[in-house]
Structure formats: structure tokens, C-alpha cells
Image (cartoon, coloured by chain):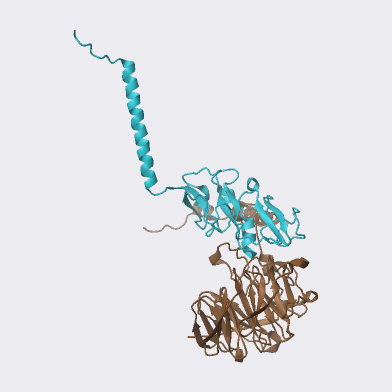
């Protein structure tokens, strides 16, 4: 069909009316202004008013000035269910998960793999390379060649072992969330004491452990740090069980200085000078406190650990962000075992090394 | 003498007919019941699968009832009985008291009861609960996830097409049998 040239009457239809356009522009401006004035026009969840929202976004943001660590490397860990991390001789990184222990060198290169017959819950490695691996209700001791040298049983029913820490004089401290106490083993596997079990005669209750996160660490001063998650506190004990209450510290709150939620921190580790590295769940964040409990800095922000802004609180267990575990090596690098990223994140203090991009370590 | 033949009047005919029909109905019903007991139970009730629920809030607003049939339930076996319960308190509650300004539930449907220091029990006042799932999110964000939504079978209208199921973004609402009308998160039917 041949196109006809436009006629005068067509031009009249197409020519925009100046006043009409001005009116439309004014209406658009008024509309945008009204929406801005009346607030967020986006629909609320389920059509409910704003007061029915549960929003943790404001707490996920961390002041960048508080972050004094940077991620130096990410070591991928090819396991499905990552449980625990520890550092051995030569800063070798030991990771327990599934029914396996993987050992990496300090740079993240995989050295060896140890297969287990049960699911590990926690582990610690001594200076000679002996590994103390806690399962739900017993411990296995492996030498530095990965051979089993001992099996230690527990003393009670309902055990849920959640952490292992080594003392200087050969003591092995095992946190038992099921029985709400810390067991003290000697190197022969004999239980020689219990810490943090409360004192009913003096109305001192045992630790409050609402969920299976109950960590223990031993400082260079010989004192045992025990997390009391339900009270948001780090508590101090002598190896023979005396509670050094004046040294306890910690408080509940959503601020970065405090421990958030019902029960935190979920994990602790100690730097060489006994400063305390803590990890929280709910608002996933890793922080450093002075030995006396004064907040110093943030190591890993919620965003680095997967809690991106605008992310809805996840109610499905299989989609929830999992709690991280911590370890510190001889160079005071902080190792964060991230079960969601299935990796070990290595953090260094920003003033100890020149700033450079994160290295992704590749393992076969 | 000739034998008198029995007479059947209309009244007797109708009465006999009704007896026969009644007996047949009785036998039929018994037969159906026998078959029903031997067969598979029928999925004829709606319920929320707590492992799939994303606590979106649609249950509160999409049920055909004015007050939704979906309500919060509490799995006591999973609960930590925390003093600072994040399903009960606002994230930044000024005090851990039952003051309305500290409490998370917009309808005040959770009751906090002291057990022993430092433990508290939390129960749902179901007539007040509208199923908004705000507490569900608060509980699972930090705690064990012992608060969860269920459809109250005593209030559910058992619609052929459940409006909540249609609106559910995670397909968490599904048919269940009358033998297992609830899907308790801790496996405890008393929850």
C-alpha cells in the first residue's frame, strides 16, 4: 500500500497542546509529591500495616569506621555441613564437617583429609599436631598422622558436646551444652573436674543455653573463658572451677557493642594478648573486644557474612544463615568458618598489612 | 370352607416398603463405613507446613474469615524459655517487661509467665492472634523457631479452595487428614 503524505487535519491531531502538556506535568509532580509526603507507597507484607513488619535492616548496617579488619583470603571447603575450625602447628587450618576433617596449610592449600565414622561437632589441635575431635557424646584423639590414639567417653547422659579447648598444662576442656557444664579431662582421658555447672547451694544457676551453641576457650593467663549465651556474657573460671565473677563481662542489645538476640555469642576465640573475638547469630557479625570486655572493632560485617540489606528474615531452616565458628592463628589472623559460603574467610587487621584485594585460594 | 386370602391394604404396603428401605440403607451405610476403614484416609483439611512457611503475613489477610483461621502455635519442646525472647520483645525493647511499648505482637496475643530465674514461658492467647507471623520471624531470626503458624481446624471453614493456600507464596498450605489435622513443629500434637 502506498503511504499518503500527512494532511493538515492529521497535523492538528498530532500537534501537542501546550497547556494540556503543562497540566499533565503538573499532575505528575503533584502525584510524586503526595506519594513522598504520605510515605512509602510499596505494598506492605500481606497488605498489613507497617507495625506488623519485622525488619532487622537497621541493625545490619555497620559504621565503616568500626571495621578495622579486612578479608585477606577465602579458602573454599568442599564439605556440605561445616561444623568447626581450629589451628594446628605451622598455622595449619583444620576444618571439621560432614564425617571428615580437612587440613589446609596457612595459605589455604589442602594438605590432607581424615575420614571419620561419625559427624564431628568441635575440634582442637595441640602444638604437637594431636587432634581432639568432639562428637555428640564422646571424643576421639588423633595423632599428627591421623591415627586414632584414644577414645574418651563422657560421664553423663544427654551430652551435647559443642566445643573443645586446650589448656597449657595438658588439660582438655569440653563444653557440654546438654548438661550445661564444661568437662575438664586430663591427657589420659579421665574427667578431673567440671566447670560452670552452677552452684545450687548458693543459688548460682548453670549457664543458660537455649540453643546448641556453648563455647569455651583458654587464655594465656590460664583462665578458662566460658560463654553464657542466654545471659550474653563471657564468664571466667580457674581450671579447678572457681568462678572469677569480677572478670565476667557482656551485655545484651542490638548495638554493635553488645550481643544481639536471645542467646549470643555463639563462638569465641582469643588473640595472643587475650583480646576476645566473638561471633553472633541472628545478626551475623564478628567483633573484637579487649580482654576486659570493651568493644574495639568489627572484623566481619553482616553483609560480608550473607545478611545483605533488604533480605527478609528467613523462617525456613534450610535457608537460614548458619552460625560461624572462629579460630585465630599465630599471626593473629582471624579465621571465620562460614558454613553458608562453605569457606574459611581469613581476616587481617588493616594496619598490619598493605591493603590489597581478597585472594581466592583454589584447591583441587 | 374356603380360606380367606390375606388382604394387603395401602397402609401395610407403605409400612413394609419403608422397613425394607430402612434396612437396605442401614446395610449400605455399614458397608460404606467398612470400606472406608479399610481404605486410605482422605486428605480433606487444610494445614500449614511450618517447614515451608515464610511468615509472609498473607494468612492474616487472605482467609475468608474476618479473623483468620491461621494462628500462632508454640512448640514448647523446642523453646529455650528465654528471658529475652525475640518472638516476644521488640528488637530494641527498652525493658524486658510486659509493657506494650516493649512487646512485639501488635495484638498482644502472647502471654509471658515467669517460671524460674531466668526462664519464662510464652503461651499464645489464640482468640487475640490474627496470624500475622511477626513473632514467628522474631523467634526464628535469633532463636530456635519454636513459634509457628497453624490453621485452627475448629475455626477453619474447610473451603474447597482455601484462599490462604492460593495466596501462599511458598506453597506451604496443603491438605492433611482428619487423623493428623496439625503439623506440629516439635512433633508434639499437644503443642
| Position of B43 relative to A285 (above/below) | above
Residue positioned most to the right: A246
Quadrant in the rendering for residue A135: bottom right
Residue positioned most to the left: B1
Q: Percent from the top left, x then y, of residue A279?
A: 66, 75
> Seen in the image, is A259 located left or right of residue B173?
right
Quadrant in the rendering for residue A262: bottom right
- The residue positioned 74% from the left and 57% from the top of the image is B102
Whether residue B124 is visible here, answered yes or no, is yes
**Front-most of A112 and B107?**
A112
**Front-most of B158 and B76?**
B76
| Position of A46 relative to A122 (above/below) | above
Instruction: Please give the letter of the chain rendered in cyan.
Output: B
Which colour represents chain A?
Answer: brown
**Front-most of A39 and A312?**
A312
Q: Quadrant of the N terminus of chain A?
A: bottom left
Whether residue A268 is visible here, answered yes or no, is no
- The residue positioned 74% from the left and 85% from the top of the image is A221
| Position of A48 relative to A76 (above/below) | above
Quadrant in the rendering for residue A285: bottom right
Q: Percent from the top left, x then y, of residue A151?
A: 55, 81
Q: Percent from the top left, x then y, of residue A327?
A: 64, 82
| Position of B170 relative to A225 (above/below) | above
Q: Percent from the top left, x then y, of residue B166?
A: 50, 51
Amino acid at each position: 500500500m502506498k503511504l499518503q503524505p500527512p494532511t493538515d487535519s492529521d497535523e492538528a491531531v498530532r500537534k501537542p497542546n501546550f497547556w494540556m502538556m503543562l497540566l499533565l506535568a503538573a499532575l505528575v509532580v503533584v502525584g510524586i509529591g503526595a506519594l513522598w509526603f504520605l510515605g512509602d507507597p510499596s505494598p506492605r507484607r500481606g497488605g498489613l500495616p507497617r507495625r506488623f513488619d519485622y525488619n532487622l535492616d537497621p541493625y545490619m548496617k555497620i559504621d565503616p569506621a568500626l571495621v578495622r579488619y579486612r578479608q585477606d583470603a577465602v579458602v573454599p571447603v568442599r564439605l556440605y555441613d561445616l561444623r568447626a575450625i581450629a589451628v594446628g602447628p605451622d598455622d595449619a587450618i583444620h576444618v571439621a564437617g560432614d564425617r571428615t576433617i580437612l587440613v589446609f596449610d596457612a595459605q589455604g592449600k589442602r594438605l590432607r583429609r581424615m575420614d571419620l565414622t561419625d559427624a564431628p561437632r568441635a575440634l582442637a589441635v595441640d602444638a604437637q599436631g594431636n587432634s581432639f575431635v568432639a562428637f555428640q557424646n564422646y571424643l576421639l584423639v588423633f595423632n599428627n598422622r591421623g591415627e586414632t590414639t584414644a577414645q574418651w567417653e563422657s560421664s553423663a547422659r544427654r551430652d551435647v558436646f559443642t566445643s573443645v579447648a586446650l589448656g597449657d598444662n595438658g588439660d582438655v576442656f569440653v563444653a557440654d551444652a546438654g548438661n550445661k557444664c564444661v568437662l575438664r579431662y586430663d591427657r589420659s582421658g579421665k574427667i578431673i573436674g567440671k566447670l560452670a555447672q552452677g552452684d545450687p547451694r548458693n543459688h548460682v544457676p548453670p549457664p543458660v543455653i537455649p540453643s546448641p551453641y556453648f563455647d569455651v576457650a583458654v587464655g594465656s593467663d590460664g583462665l578458662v573463658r566460658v560463654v553464657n549465651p542466654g545471659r550474653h556474657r563471657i564468664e571466667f573460671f580457674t581450671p579447678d572451677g572457681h568462678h572469677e565473677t569480677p572478670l565476667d563481662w557482656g551485655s545484651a542489645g542490638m548495638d554493635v557493642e553488645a550481643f544481639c538476640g536471645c542467646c549470643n555469642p555463639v563462638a569465641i576465640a582469643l588473640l595472643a594478648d587475650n583480646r576476645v573475638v566473638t561471633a553472633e547469630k541472628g545478626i551475623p557479625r564478628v567483633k573484637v573486644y579487649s580482654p576486659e570486655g570493651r568493644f574495639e572493632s568489627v572484623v566481619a560485617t553482616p553483609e560480608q557474612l550473607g545478611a545483605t540489606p533488604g533480605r527478609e528474615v528467613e523462617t525456613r531452616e534450610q535457608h537460614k544463615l548458619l552460625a560461624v565458628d572462629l579460630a585465630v592463628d599465630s599471626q593473629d589472623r582471624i579465621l571465620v568458618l562460614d558454613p553458608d559460603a562453605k569457606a574459611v574467610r581469613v581476616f587481617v587487621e588493616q594496619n598490619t598489612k598493605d591493603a590489597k584485594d581478597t585472594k581466592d585460594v583454589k584447591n583441587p | 370352607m374356603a380360606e380367606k386370602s390375606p388382604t394387603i391394604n395401602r397402609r401395610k404396603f407403605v409400612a413394609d416398603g419403608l422397613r425394607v428401605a430402612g434396612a437396605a440403607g442401614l446395610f449400605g451405610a455399614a458397608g460404606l463405613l467398612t470400606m472406608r476403614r479399610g481404605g486410605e484416609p482422605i486428605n480433606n483439611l487444610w494445614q500449614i507446613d511450618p517447614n515451608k512457611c515464610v511468615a509472609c503475613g498473607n494468612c492474616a489477610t487472605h482467609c475468608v474469615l474476618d479473623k483468620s483461621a491461621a494462628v500462632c502455635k508454640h512448640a514448647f519442646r523446642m523453646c529455650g524459655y528465654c528471658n529475652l525472647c525475640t518472638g516476644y520483645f521488640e528488637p530494641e525493647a527498652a525493658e524486658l517487661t510486659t509493657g506494650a511499648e516493649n512487646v512485639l505482637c501488635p495484638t498482644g496475643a502472647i502471654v509471658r509467665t515467669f517460671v524460674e530465674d531466668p526462664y519464662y514461658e510464652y503461651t499464645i492467647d489464640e482468640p487475640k492472634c490474627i496470624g500475622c507471623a511477626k513473632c514467628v520471624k522474631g523467634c526464628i531470626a535469633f532463636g530456635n523457631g519454636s513459634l509457628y503458624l497453624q490453621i485452627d481446624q475448629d475455626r477453619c471453614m474447610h473451603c474447597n479452595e482455601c484462599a490462604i493456600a492460593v495466596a501462599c507464596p511458598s506453597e506451604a498450605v496443603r491438605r492433611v487428614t482428619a487423623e493428623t489435622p496439625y503439623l506440629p513443629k516439635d512433633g508434639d500434637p499437644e503443642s
